[in-house]
Image: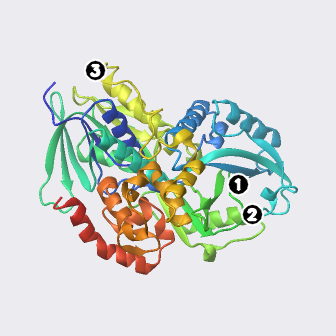
């Protein structure tokens, strides 16, 4: 094969692209990842923040997907215990939507389709005698409780990219892939860095198009959408969420059955808020600027109000966000029935391999990456075998995955850190918090305080190791501090960033 700049070029810095980059770099390949904006700027930061088996997928007989998702839930709890948290879900029963026996059977399957190490099994609950029933409407008398996981979705992406970079991958954000050209035995890729007047080009032995909602646009821009093997269609489905003030006491979440057959999650969020989502609406607009529609807003408010004692209206909504799911179009007429499983399309335009990724879900990104690499390498034993299921993500090397014990130990080491700041550092960075805390003996050692617990040392870390370049990157994707900080803090951070970036990155 021709000598190329990289073994593998990946288009897209969402969860699938970052996961593939990590897997490939760890097997010894030279890897380039191109992301048009910031890491996780699209769908991968706009999810419901759950790592779950997908209980409702059992209704569509997707046993393989649910089993695989449940297995991945366990693996991710093992490799990223700092950013994953077990969470109980209360399912109030409404016989008009699904019979009691059907839910009980579904939960039995959910408990037993895959081995559980970290989470308890499901159980029935008397809502009249349990604190779980207090916030619910009075007519709910019984239900079920089961467990899944919450995750910081955007941080999951960043940690995969960090691990890839530490294993030799080159991660280029804000670089738009403009052309993919098949050569005799390799690929030529052109890309345009943000602010540059000229495009750059590289060659790669293999290409993966993991551009999510843009997967077809990447192919169409290079004339690769109608070649030897027909390229599948992508079904763009918008999912919207609303955030309201903290609605009830307790750390439990709720899963609400809807009359249209869908479910809506109600989840404690960022201590002070409650997150409600999601919807499923066909989408044709700007992929970078999806917005909640009036119908979606009414749907989510009605879903909450129908099930809870207190009603909410759009006046209670503090913030909304929407993401576009790039589902593999399997021909189903209903969005809720379209599979969340992934499809890997192999291109035949060159002797060099290329795969485009359609569909997929946050929970199964790691196994998707493993299968992509299996296809590309075709069991080529020059490279290392699969490895990502057991090796912790950056910061996840917490003894036995016990985050509470780790918090206590870090509190003894950094006695001067306020408890809320310590908890946030542990939840965001795990053991990597020591990279910007080491040697510090007080808050003054963390540099300039921009307000609301944002210190210079953390900002330098995010710029140096996590590709943060703007206040939005820091406040909404590397964290969710945008929900908490005031305008003065935002302005102080924006004012400081140019000098901080110059200090850390030089003329890069």
Residue 78 image offset from top left, x and y in percent: 53, 38
Residue under the point 41% across and 81% down: 488
Q: Is residue 76 visible?
A: yes
Q: Nearer the viewer, mark 2 or mark 3?
A: 3
Q: Secondary structure at mark 1?
A: strand
Q: Secondary structure at mark 2?
A: helix
Residue under the point 43% across and 42% down: 393
297 vs 466, left or right, is right
Counting labels gives: 3
Does 68 appear above or below 11? above
Q: Which residue is mark 1?
A: 256
Nearer to the camera, 35 or 315? 35
Q: Which residue is mark 3?
A: 382
Q: Secondary structure at mark 3?
A: loop
Q: Which residue is mark 2?
A: 306
Residue 312: quarter of image: bottom right
Residue 217 image offset from top left, x and y in percent: 31, 49
Mark sitting earlier along the chain (1/3): 1
Dot 3, crowdedness within 10 Å: few (<14), some or many (≥20)? few
Residue 272 image offset from top left, x and y in percent: 61, 68
377 vs 484, left or right, is left
Nearer to the camera, 62 or 200? 200
């Amino acid at each position: 094969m021709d000598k190329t700049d990289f073994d593998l070029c990946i288009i897209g810095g969402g969860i699938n692209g970052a996961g593939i980059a990590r897997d490939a770099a760890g097997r010894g390949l030279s890897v380039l990842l191109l992301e048009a904006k910031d890491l996780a700027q699209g769908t991968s930061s706009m999810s419901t923040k759950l790592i779950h088996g997908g209980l409702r997928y059992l209704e569509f007989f997707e046993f393989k997907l649910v089993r695989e998702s449940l297995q991945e839930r366990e693996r991710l709890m093992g490799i990223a215990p700092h950013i994953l948290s077990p969470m109980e879900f209360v399912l109030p029963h409404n016989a008009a939507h699904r019979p009691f026996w059907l839910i009980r059977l579904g939960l039995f399957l959910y408990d037993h389709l895959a081995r559980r190490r970290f989470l308890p099994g499901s159980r029935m609950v008397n809502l009249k005698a349990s604190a779980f029933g207090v916030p619910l409407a009075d007519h709910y008398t019984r239900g079920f409780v089961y467990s899944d996981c919450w995750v910081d979705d955007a941080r999951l992406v960043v940690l995969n990219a960090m691990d890839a970079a530490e294993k030799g991958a080159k991660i280029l954000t804000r670089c738009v892939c403009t052309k993919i050209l098949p050569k005799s035995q390799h690929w030529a890729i052109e890309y345009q860095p943000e602010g540059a007047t000229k495009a750059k080009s590289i060659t790669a032995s293999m290409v993966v198009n993991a551009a999510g909602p843009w997967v077809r646009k990447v192919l169409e821009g290079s004339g690769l959408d109608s070649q030897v093997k027909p390229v599948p269609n992508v079904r763009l489905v918008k999912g919207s969420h609303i955030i309201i003030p903290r609605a009830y006491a307790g750390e439990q979440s709720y899963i609400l059955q809807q009359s249209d057959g869908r479910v809506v999650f109600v989840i404690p969020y960022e201590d002070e808020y409650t997150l409600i989502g999601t919807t499923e609406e066909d989408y044709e607009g700007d992929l970078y600027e999806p917005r909640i529609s009036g119908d979606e807003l009414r749907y989510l408010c009605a879903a909450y109000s129908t099930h809870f004692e207190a009603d909410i209206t759009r006046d209670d909504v503090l913030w909304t966000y929407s993401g576009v799911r790039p589902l593999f179009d399997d021909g189903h007429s209903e969005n809720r029935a379209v599979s969340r499983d992934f499809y890997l399309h192999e291109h035949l335009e060159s002797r060099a391999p290329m795969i485009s990724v359609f569909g997929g879900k946050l929970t199964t990104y790691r196994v998707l990456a493993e299968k992509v690499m299996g296809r590309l390498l075709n069991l080529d034993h020059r490279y290392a075998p699969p490895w990502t299921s057991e090796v912790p993500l950056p910061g996840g090397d917490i003894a036995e995955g016990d985050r509470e014990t780790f918090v206590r130990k870090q509190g003894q080491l950094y006695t001067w850190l306020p408890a809320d700041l310590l908890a946030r550092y542990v939840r965001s960075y795990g053991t990597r918090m020591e990279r910007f805390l080491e040697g510090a003996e007080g808050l003054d050692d963390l540099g300039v305080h921009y307000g609301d617990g944002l210190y210079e040392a953390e900002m330098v870390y995010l710029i140096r190791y996590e590709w943060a370049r703007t206040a939005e990157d820091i406040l909404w994707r590397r964290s969710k501090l945008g929900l908490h900080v005031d305008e003065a803090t935002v302005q102080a951070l924006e004012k400081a960033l140019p000098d901080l970036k110059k200090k850390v990155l030089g003329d890069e």
